Amino acid sequence: MNNAQKLLEKIQNEKISQTQSWVFTIQNIALWAIYSILILLGSISFSILLFSFLNTDIDILHHITHSSFEFFLAIAPILWVGLLFLFLFIAYFGLQYTKKGYKYTLFQIVGINIGISIILGNTMYFLGGAEKIDKTLGDMVSEYESMEKRKISHWSHPEEGILSGEILKIDQNTIKIRDFYQKIWIIDIQNTETKGNSKENILIQKNNKIKIFGNMLKNIPDNTIFIADEIRPWGGYKGKGRKSQ
Amino acid sequence: MISTSFTDEELAKKSIENIDFFAELFTRYEKKLFFYIRRISYFSEEEAEEILQDSFIKAWKNLKGFDKDLSFSTWIYRIVHNTTISEWKKTQSKNRDSYVKIEESEYVNIPSNINIIKELEIKCTKQEVQKLLYQLSPQYKEVLILKFIEEKSYEEISDILQKPSGTIATLISRAKKQFKQISEKQNISF
C-alpha cells in the first residue's frame, strides 16, 4: 500500500470530516469584530484624553503640581493612557491573525491602529461623546475621577490663590460663593478681570459657577475672604477679559 | 483514474466532493514535502512521513477554508512548515539528540546549480551546503531552504511563513551573510 492509499484509509477509517465553510466565515467575522471593538475602545480612550487635555486649565497646573510627572498626570489621566496602549496593543494581534494581516509590518499595523483611533477619537470628541462617556462613568463609578471631579480638585486650592464655586449673592464690590466643599466665601471683585463675558452670557450672575484666581486673606477668622484678580466661567471660555465695573 | 491535467487548485476544489482527487494531490507533493520536512528539521524518515501524513490530514480538514488567493502549493507548504516546527518544538522539550544522518539520495533534490553558491561566490559541494545550512539559526535556515532549494519567490515565502515580504528580504540577506561567514570559518572549498 502506498502512502496516498494509507492517507485515504486513515481519513476514511477515522471518519475525519472537513470543517464547514461557515465556520471559517464566522472565524473571520469574529476576528474582524474583535479588532473593530478594540479600535473603537482605543478611539474612546483617545477622545477622553483629548477632552481632558483641551479642558484642563494648564496655566494653573504649575501652581498645584510639584513635578513633571504630576503635571502629566493632571492633564492625561493615567487610566486612559494605559487603556489606549492596551487596546492598541491587543488590536495589533487581532489584525495579525486575519487572513492578510501577516503581510503588514509592526510599524504599519501600529500606524494603522493609531491613525484610526485618532480619526475616530477626534470625531467622537467633537460630537460630544467623550464628555458624555466621562460624565456617565463619573456618575456610575465612585472611584472614577471624571473631568469634572478633577477640575474641582484643581480649582480648590485657596491657599495657592485658586478657588471655585457657585455664586450665591451679588453685592456692589463683593460676591458670596459656596465652593464645591460647601464652604462659604466672600470674594472681593473691586479690581477683578473677568473672562468669557458676552452679550448672551454674563459671568457674574447668581447660580453661575466660576473659577477664581487671586489671594486668600490670611489672619481672618475661618479664612473666608478672597481677593479676586481674575474670574473665569466654570465652563472654560477662552474669551478676552475686561475689568469689572 | 484521476486526470493529471487538472491544476492543483482544481484538484483541491474537486477533493471536497471526491477524496480520490485529494490522493492525487498528495502524490504530487509527497516527495517534495518529505524532503522539505527533513531539511528544516532533524526528524528521521519515519517521523517525516508521519508529519507529512498529519499535515495532509490537517489540509483535508481545512480544505473548505483554503484561501483561494494563495496557490495550493503555498498553502500546503505553510501547513507542512507549521506542523513540522510545532512537532520539532515538542521533541526539543524532551532534550532529544538533534543529529540526523542525511541520506545520499536526499542530496539529489538540491539543485545542481544551486544559486546560493553562485550568489555568495563560494565553492562547496551539495553535501557541504546541507551541512552549512544546519549550522544556521532556524529562522535563517528556513528562508534559505525555501528560497534556494525549494525555489520559492519572496511573495510565496511571505505567504508560507506568514511574515511581511520586507521581513523575508531582510532575513534572506542576513542568512546569506551568516552562511558565508560560516563557510569562510570552515574554509569550505573543492
Image (spheres, coloured by chain):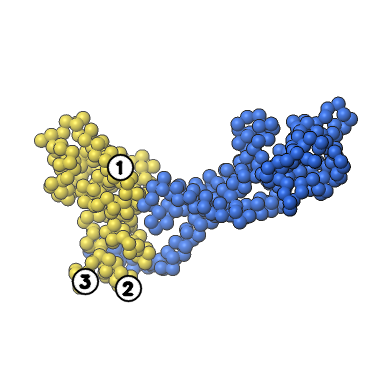
Chain colours: A blue, B yellow
Indicate the amino acid at tag 3. Answer: Ile
Give the secondary structure at mark 3.
loop
Q: Residue B61, can we see it?
A: no
Mark on residue B2?
A: 3
Tag nearer the camera, 2 or 1: 1
Query: What's the mark number on residue B17?
Result: 2
| Chain ID of residue with mark 3 | B
Q: Which residue is mark 1?
A: B170
Asked whether, in this view, residue A166 is left or right of residue B140, the answer is right
The residues bearing labels 2 and 1 have C-alpha atoms spaced at a distance of: 42 Å
Left or right: A51 in relation to B145: right
- Residue A235 in the image: state x and y as whole percent: 71, 47
Mark toward the start of the polypeptide (2 vs 1):
2
Residue extending farthest to the right is A221
Give the quarter of the figure containing the C terminus of chain A.
Answer: top right
The outermost residue toward the front is A245
Query: Mark 1 packing: few (<14 Cα in 10 Å), some, or many (20+)?
Result: few
Q: Type of residue at label 1?
A: Thr
Residue, far top: A219
Residue B130 coordinates in the image, percent (x, y): 20, 42
Evaluate if marks 1 and 3 touch, with contact meaning CB atoms under 8 Å apart.
no
Whether residue B112 is visible, yes or no, is yes
Res B132 quadrant in image:
top left
In the rendered structure, which disc, 1 or 3, sits on the residue that comes first in sequence?
3
In the image, what residue occupies the spot 45% across and 47% down? A110
* Mark 1 secondary-structure assignment: helix
Q: Nearer the viewer, residue B175 or B50?
A: B175
In the picture shown, does residue B40 fall above or below A5?
above
Residue sitting nearer the eye, A82 or B127: A82
Q: Percent from the top left, x then y, of residue A134?
A: 66, 50
Residue at far left of view: B190
The type of residue carrying mark 2 is Glu
